[in-house]
Image (cartoon, grey):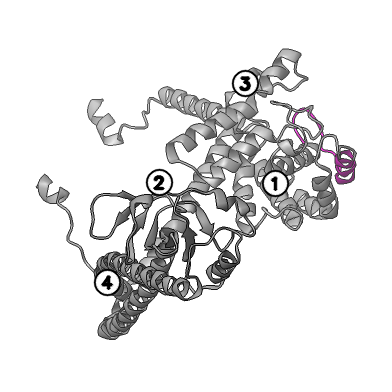
Amino acid sequence: MQQAQNSPRPFRLRSRAALIAATLSLQAVVIGLGGYVTLQAARANLADKVGESAAKDNARACEDFVKVLGTEVHEPFEYASPEWERVQNHVKTFSLPEGAQLVVLDDHGRVLCHPRLENSPALRTLDIAAQVVRLDGSEEPVELSRINPAEVKTGTSESISGRASVAVAYVPSLGVKVLVYRPQAVLSAAAARMGEKVIVWVTVSGLVLLGVSLVGSSILVRKYDSMVMRVNEQLEHEVERRTRRGLTIRNAVVFGLAKLADYRDTDTGAHLERICRYSVVLAQELCEQFPEVDHAWIERLRVAASMHDIGKVGIPDSILLKPGRLTDEERRIMETHPVIGADTLLAVRRRVGDDDLLTMGIQVALSHHERWDGTGYPFRLKGEQIPLAGRIVAVADVYDALTSKRVYKGAMGHEQAVAIIREGSGSHFDARVVEAFLRVSEQFNQVRASAVSDVPERPRLESVVERARLIQEQSVAMHRGAEESDVLPFVRPERRTRAA
């Protein structure tokens, strides 16, 4: 049974696009392999053909120049003589195959005539008598000084401008050798150009075949397309629905975690609702100033803002619920709650992986008590070091703290709270966030008026404990009353009669 479950599933083509893609992929592989083999064979053949053609062209050019020498010069000549000048002019103007060079050497193997000799006189001293040439049809390399053929000989050389195809002929009546050579780089370039034409031809042919196959495949599978598309649409809707549900559950769990912290804080759930609404109002006002603030970013902030104080679950009740002023040591402990909150969310993120909401929640929890001038806590971040989400929640949190009634203080008026936040611009808060706050302060006032109660907010944990105590007292009172009347609430009257 286990083997059957672990066996690989058969490959199935479930859509028109998949079928067409599979067909085209298979044909592309076949055409590609065929084209590759064809190109490799063509390149090898082209290289051979180009080499043979180059050898013939070199030999023909060498023969033609020897004939020119036979008609122009009839006896040996020396450098800078009138005969030499005629030969040099012919060397410069002689028509040669593409990339070929023609050189006339004296009996000692030195350059006597060269097309660039006038511009580079140093070529006159160039001695290539020891140049090694491998003649066609011979396996043994021979030095150029030992090659004195009456007829043109062709071969290859390894030193004249690199490897080259050469043709050489000896003119005994003049005591000179005529050398025509064409560098291998020129031949390779010619072969490459021819190869490119072959590649273009093969590519065009392959694309035409693939195009014909695409049209044919589309026609063949079209009648199955409607049903498959409907199935795909249903699956997409289901995936989207489940994704939305998953995000809703995630957000609800996160908000529940934040509410759990409220059970031990001096705020109620209304505090979280207000902070979230304040933060969203500010973010919407700042969206034009900060490109990262878009609809998705604001929705993440709506949930992340509720997590700003979850670290307070790690603060002792004696400090968290203390109605009076905290001592320095108590203040130091209280200022660890951002780190506790961020560490809690980091532990969650390590389990679930990267998540934009958790990342923003960590930023908010860790930085909403930092100050723009670097005097905040826990890390004394300064300016742009503080994440934007933390800077927004900082303003929302301070406004709510100022305008909410607590057991240890009264609620401050809206105008007074606005004045305090304006005064903190550039020191406590980011000036841009404060400017946005001032523009939407009336919306803050509306949220405050609709959510703030005249009853001082108490810790939910304290309220729960008090309700539990009242229930327990009522239960004890009922139990005592039952004993006095000799009536046990869980015993039926008929059973009491039998017992009597």
Q: State the SS at label 3.
A: helix
Among numbered discs 4 and 2, the one appearing first in the sequence: 4
Q: Which mark is residue 130?
A: 2
Which image quadrant is residue 52 in?
bottom left
Q: Amino acid at mark 4?
A: Ile
* Residue 47 drawn in magenta: no
The mark closer to the camera, 2 or 3, is 2
- Mark 1–mark 4 Cα distance, whole angstroms, equals 66 Å
Tell me if residue 60 comes above or below residue 157 in the rendering: below
Question: In the orientation shown, which residue stands out farthest toward the front?
Answer: 75
Q: How crowded is the residue under tag 3: few (<14 C-alpha within 10 Å), some, or many (20+)? A: few
* Residue 406 drawn in magenta: yes
Residue under pointer 3: 317
- Mark 2–mark 1 Cα distance, whole angstroms, equals 96 Å
Q: How crowded is the residue under tag 1: few (<14 C-alpha within 10 Å), some, or many (20+)? A: many
Q: Are marks 2 and 3 in contact (CB under 8 Å)?
A: no
Q: Amino acid at mark 2?
A: Ala
- Mark 1–mark 3 Cα distance, whole angstroms, equals 24 Å
Q: Which mark is residue 122?
A: none
Q: Amino acid at mark 3?
A: Asp
Q: Which mark is residue 274?
A: 1
Tell me if residue 432 comes above or below residue 336 in the rendering: below
Q: State the SS at label 4.
A: helix
For the record, the magenta segment spans: 405-422
The mark closer to the camera, 4 or 3, is 4
- Mark 4–mark 2 Cα distance, whole angstroms, equals 50 Å
Q: Are marks 4 and 2 in contact (CB under 8 Å)?
A: no
Among numbered discs 2 and 1, the one appearing first in the sequence: 2
